[in-house]
Image (cartoon, rainbow, N blue to C red):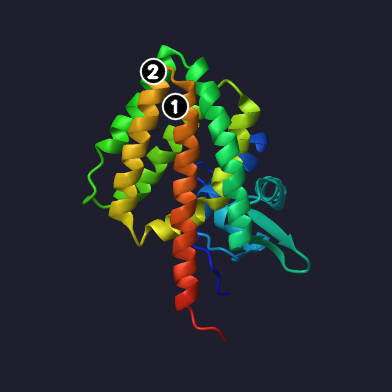
Amino acid sequence: MNTIFKNEALDVAAADEPAQLLPEMVYHRLRLQILNGELKRGQLLRQEELAQRYNVSRVPLREALSRLEADGLIVLRPRRGYAVNTLDQKDIVEIFELRAVVEEHAGHLAALARTPADVTRVGDILARMEALDRNKKGHFAEWFRCNRDFHTEMLAASKRARVVRLAGTLRDAVEPYIRAESEHRRGDNVRDADAEHREMFEAFSAGDARGLAELSRRHVERAAGLLLRGMRKHAAKTPRG
């Protein structure tokens, strides 16, 4: 039988894992594969193939799929099953508008509530990101991991768990699109983003709430502009059938 998936059992045999951990493991694995583009936009997720791929039963798989649907990463299509969500430009504009508001607010709170430990943790992530060798294989994927950690840890310093979760959900919704577009302009995108990250960290470290709020909003708006311009450019080049 042809399948879109390779066999990819979880790192620990499913039979040996406590039942309550399996949905979490499957959820995180699928989520990562959606975010990094391994599972493509619009791709159908057949439960039989997924269960075989991860060597799990349908029960933990359904729980993981329900969480991904709640996150907005997949959708349930009548009579077809789950598929990776596809966003149009209007959806993406709305998500970035929300991100700008949420991350501006969270940045303001984070600068006020950060502790020395928070500053050290975020600074270490930024140093690791800035030290990455752009000519090394796997640099792009590692940079995105550091980028996610940088924003997550900085916003977590706000001590507002719901705000942090909302910011993460909104970021996840558009990350596959940002990654795909960034493939075409890796050097420029990374250099500009690294410079913005350094400015944001300096404001965060100094406790400059107004400054970090402004920088956070501008950072989101810049990402939105790059993505939307790229999408429009590609759409203009695509022949209409």
Vertical relation: 28 (above or below) 233 = above
Name the residue tied to disc 1: 211
Vertical relation: 204 (above or below) 136 = above
With 76 as the anchor, is 27 left or right in this view?
left
Vertical relation: 212 (above or below) 54 = above
Pinpoint residue 201: horizontal percent, then vertical percent: 37, 27
Element assignment for label 1: helix
- Which is more foreground, mark 2 or mark 1? 1
Pinpoint residue 231: horizontal percent, then vertical percent: 48, 65
Pinpoint residue 130: horizontal percent, then vertical percent: 27, 37
Pinpoint residue 166: horizontal percent, then vertical percent: 63, 37
Q: Earlier in the sequence, mark 2 or mark 1?
A: 2
Q: What distance separates the C-alpha of mark 2 from that of mark 1?
A: 10 Å
With 218 as the anchor, is 130 left or right in this view?
left
Q: Residues within 10 Å of mark 2 (few under 14, many from 20)?
A: some
Decide which of 18, 159 is in the foreground and name it: 159
Name the residue tied to disc 2: 206
Query: Residue type at mark 1?
Result: Gly
Residue projecting furthest to the top: 116
Decide which of 133, 207 is in the foreground and name it: 207
